[in-house]
């Protein structure tokens, strides 16, 4: 038997492309956020609320990742935000090369904020760097307060947590304090927002945070 | 489920929607990875092919892989996908040896290094939460074992 020592990262190809994407974002001054959640947690609804609040203030764009259909792209296009839809056709997550391709189809000049809406999945997308500044994970109250402990890798790899559907709390056995503290146990550095896309509660705080990210000197 | 011709078509079509605005572009994934462990298994075999001497693929017996607890990999799924692909790569006797890596953190306040239990990211010594990750995110090929000719 002979042994060849390799010591290579399995996702090195993805990481190289992610680095290229990150350089593009830095050169163009674009804040890129990778939006992750389980299916139906409200990523697209949060984008819609965000566009209503921030349109006219900054130049935004979206890369939509879905297994099938361009329904999400249709939803966000209503807000006159440039959008590119990636259909993964079965793929459970976005990879850096798909984002690189999508970027070729967006006008990056003057763009200030780019949302990359990942495929709804709390497992696979956590391992794939797309070149984003940070991951924003959305959890909804209907999923239950134990989810941060069941999907720790995603929580740990994210910088921001949006807790959505807080308007439904009176009808659910979900304890918001438990949900928040479970998330902060796994990742004490998380910035947490509690929102309802139905009532609009909490959206202003999230949008203020976005303003500070995009215009740090103001 | 591949399109005729073997490649996924790249679609670039502007499509109008009810409100009249336009969707800039729709892209389709050219290579499907239905389960992400399948894509990982492919990446592993690509790297192995690049690393073994020409003509020695059939001699590959064992590929040692480090998988961190936070890497988002299900070892059983990865082994299943790997075994499904070795045949078409001419590596029928290759096995995957997965070394699970625990989550290890170092406290930036008191420098204490510890294994994170139950994903509770707080220093057991000073209760600090200002931590750096030492291990847990690995997804690396360590080495490849080849049978002698």
Image (cartoon, coloured by chain):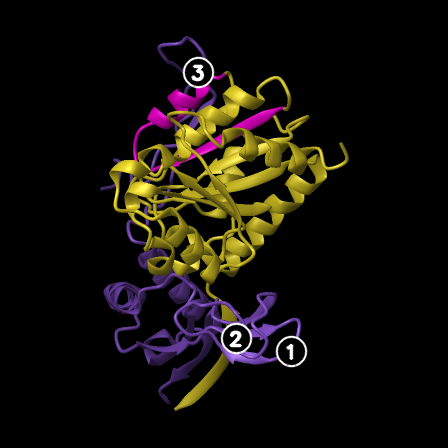
Q: What residue did someone put label 1 on?
A: B111
Of pointers 3 and 2, the one earlier in the residue sequence:
2
Q: Which lettered chain is shown in yellow? A: A
Label 3 environment density (alpha carbons within 10 Å; few <14, some 14–19, many ≥20): some
Q: CA distance from mark 1 to mark 2?
A: 27 Å
**Viewer-closest of A106 and A5:** A106
**Label 2: chain?**
A
Residue B140 location (% of width, % of height): 47, 70
In screen coordinates, is A107 left or right of A47?
right
Q: Which lettered chain is shown in purple? A: B
**Viewer-closest of B75 and A75:** A75
**Viewer-closest of A163 and B12:** A163
Q: Which quadrant of the figure contains the C terminus of chain A? A: top right
Q: Which SS class for mark 3?
A: loop
> Which one is in front in this view, the residue at disc 1 or the one at disc 2?
1
> Which one is in front in this view, the residue at disc 1 or the one at disc 3?
1
Q: Which SS class for mark 2?
A: strand
**Label 3: chain?**
A
Checking the image for residue B132, the label placed there is none
Residue depicted at 33% across the width and 25% down the height:
A71
Whether residue B105 is situated above or below residue B146 in the rendered picture: above
Whether residue B9 is situated above or below residue B54 in the rendered picture: above
Residue A34 location (% of width, % of height): 50, 43
In screen coordinates, is A196 left or right of A61?
left
Residue depicted at 54% across the width and 35% down the height:
A206
In the rendered image, residues at marks 3 and 2 fall on the same chain? yes
Q: For the magenta stretch, what is the residue range?
A: A59-79
Q: What residue did someone put label 2 on?
A: A7
In screen coordinates, is B142 left or right of A189?
left
**Label 1: chain?**
B
Checking the image for residue A78, the label placed there is 3
Any part of residue A127 in sight: no
């Amino acid at each position: 038997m002979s042994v060849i020592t390799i010591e290579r990262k399995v996702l090195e190809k993805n990481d190289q492309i992610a680095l290229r994407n990150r350089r593009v974002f830095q050169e163009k001054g674009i804040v890129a956020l990778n939006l992750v959640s389980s299916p139906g947690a409200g990523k697209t609804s949060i984008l819609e609320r965000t566009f209503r609040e921030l349109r006219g203030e900054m130049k935004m764009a979206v890369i939509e990742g879905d297994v099938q259909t361009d329904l999400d792209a249709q939803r966000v296009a209503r807000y006159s935000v440039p959008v590119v839809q990636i259909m993964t056709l079965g793929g459970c997550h976005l990879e850096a090369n798909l984002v690189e391709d999508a970027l070729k189809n967006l006008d990056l000049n003057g763009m200030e904020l780019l949302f990359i809406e990942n495929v709804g999945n709390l497992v696979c997308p956590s391992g794939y760097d797309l070149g984003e500044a940070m991951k924003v994970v959305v959890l909804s109250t209907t999923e239950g307060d134990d989810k941060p402990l069941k999907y720790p890798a995603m929580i740990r790899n994210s910088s921001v947590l949006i807790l959505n559907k807080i308007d439904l709390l009176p009808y659910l056995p979900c304890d918001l304090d438990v949900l928040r503290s479970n998330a902060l146990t796994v990742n004490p550095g998380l910035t947490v927002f509690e929102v309802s896309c139905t009532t609009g509660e909490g959206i202003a705080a999230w949008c203020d945070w976005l303003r500070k990210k995009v215009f740090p000197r103001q | 489920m591949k399109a005729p011709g073997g490649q996924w078509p790249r679609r670039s079509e502007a499509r109008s929607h009810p409100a009249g605005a336009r969707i800039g572009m729709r892209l389709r994934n050219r290579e499907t990875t239905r389960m992400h462990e399948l894509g990982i298994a492919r990446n592993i075999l690509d790297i192995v092919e690049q690393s073994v001497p020409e003509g020695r693929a059939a001699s590959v017996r064992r590929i040692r892989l480090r998988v961190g607890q936070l890497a988002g990999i299900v070892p059983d799924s990865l082994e299943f996908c790997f075994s499904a692909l070795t045949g078409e790569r001419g590596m029928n006797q290759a096995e995957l040896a997965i070394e699970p890596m625990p989550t290890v953190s170092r406290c930036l306040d008191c420098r204490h290094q510890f294994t994170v239990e139950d994903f509770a990211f707080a220093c057991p010594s000073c209760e600090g939460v200002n931590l750096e990750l030492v291990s847990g995110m690995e997804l690396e090929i360590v080495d490849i074992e080849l049978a002698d000719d």
